[in-house]
Amino acid sequence: MMKTVFKFFLYLLLFIIAFFVFLPKELLYNQIEKALEQNKIVVSNEIRDEKLFGLDIKNADIYFNGINMANVNKISFTSYLFYTNIDITDIRLLDSLKNMVPTPINKLKVEHSVLNLDKLSISSTGLFGSAKGFVDLKKREVQLEIDASSKMKSSYSQILRTMKLKDGKYIYDYKF
């Protein structure tokens, strides 16, 4: 009896591992691109590199309404059974957007877990300082806590004035 239960769990584990290894990651990425395209966001000129449990996108240009908004050095999608992680490194915004956020943004990390289905966790670092927060998909809101750098405080003070200041950190709330 115990041997049968052990075999069942072993086969189940092997099936799950094989499922994620052989999952068509580029097909999933194409579906994500189609969903972004509906919001007028286009990713182009990217180089794709499929990994065992993920997909890397390198040197991607991000367009919004046909206007080049940013260049991203690397986007790494990694997914396991209960956890998904997106790491974006070296985001360089277009010159006309530099008056809103200091560029480059060194790292942006988005995490999702099935233990908390309706929330995405966000963390980021860059010339602006650092930020941590979440996206609540159910309530359709974004909340970021920004620890602003001295450059952000001096050069982008007008943007910071639109945010709440709490315990030396700036709070950004947005509903979509």
Image (tube, rainbow, N blue to C red):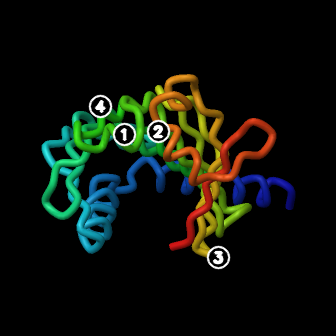
Circle 3 or circle 1, nearest the eye: 3
- Which amino acid is tagged 1? Ile
| Mark 4 in CB contact with mark 3 (< 8 angstroms) | no
The location of residue 86, given as percent across then percent down, is 48, 45
106, above or below 61, in the image: above
Element under label 2? Answer: strand
| Mark 4 in CB contact with mark 1 (< 8 angstroms) | no
- Which amino acid is tagged 2? Asp
- Which amino acid is tagged 3? Lys
Q: Nearer the viewer, residue 91 or 127?
A: 127
Q: Nearer the viewer, residue 127 or 85?
A: 127
Residue 160's label in the rendered image is none
Residue placed under numbered mark 3 in the picture: 139
Estimate the spatial distance between the alpha carbons at disc 4 and disc 1, rounded to whole Å. 7 Å
The location of residue 111, given as percent across then percent down, is 58, 49
* Label whose residue precedes the other's in the sequence (2 or 3): 2
Q: Nearer the viewer, residue 138 or 12?
A: 138
Element under label 1? Answer: strand
In which image quadrant can residue 99 be found?
Answer: top left
Circle 2 or circle 3, nearest the eye: 3
In which image quadrant can residue 72 be found?
Answer: top left
- Given the current orientation, which residue lies at the most extreme top position? 150
Is residue 13 in view? Answer: no
Residue placed under numbered mark 1 in the picture: 75
Is residue 105 in view? Answer: yes
Estimate the spatial distance between the alpha carbons at disc 4 and disc 3, rounded to whole Å. 32 Å
| Mark 1 in CB contact with mark 2 (< 8 angstroms) | yes
Residue 73's label in the rendered image is 4
The location of residue 78, given as percent across then percent down, is 48, 44
Q: Nearer the viewer, residue 93 or 87?
A: 93
* Label whose residue precedes the other's in the sequence (4 or 3): 4
Estimate how packed mark 3 is, as few (under 14), some (14 to 19) or many (20 or more) residues with alpha carbons within 10 Å. Answer: few
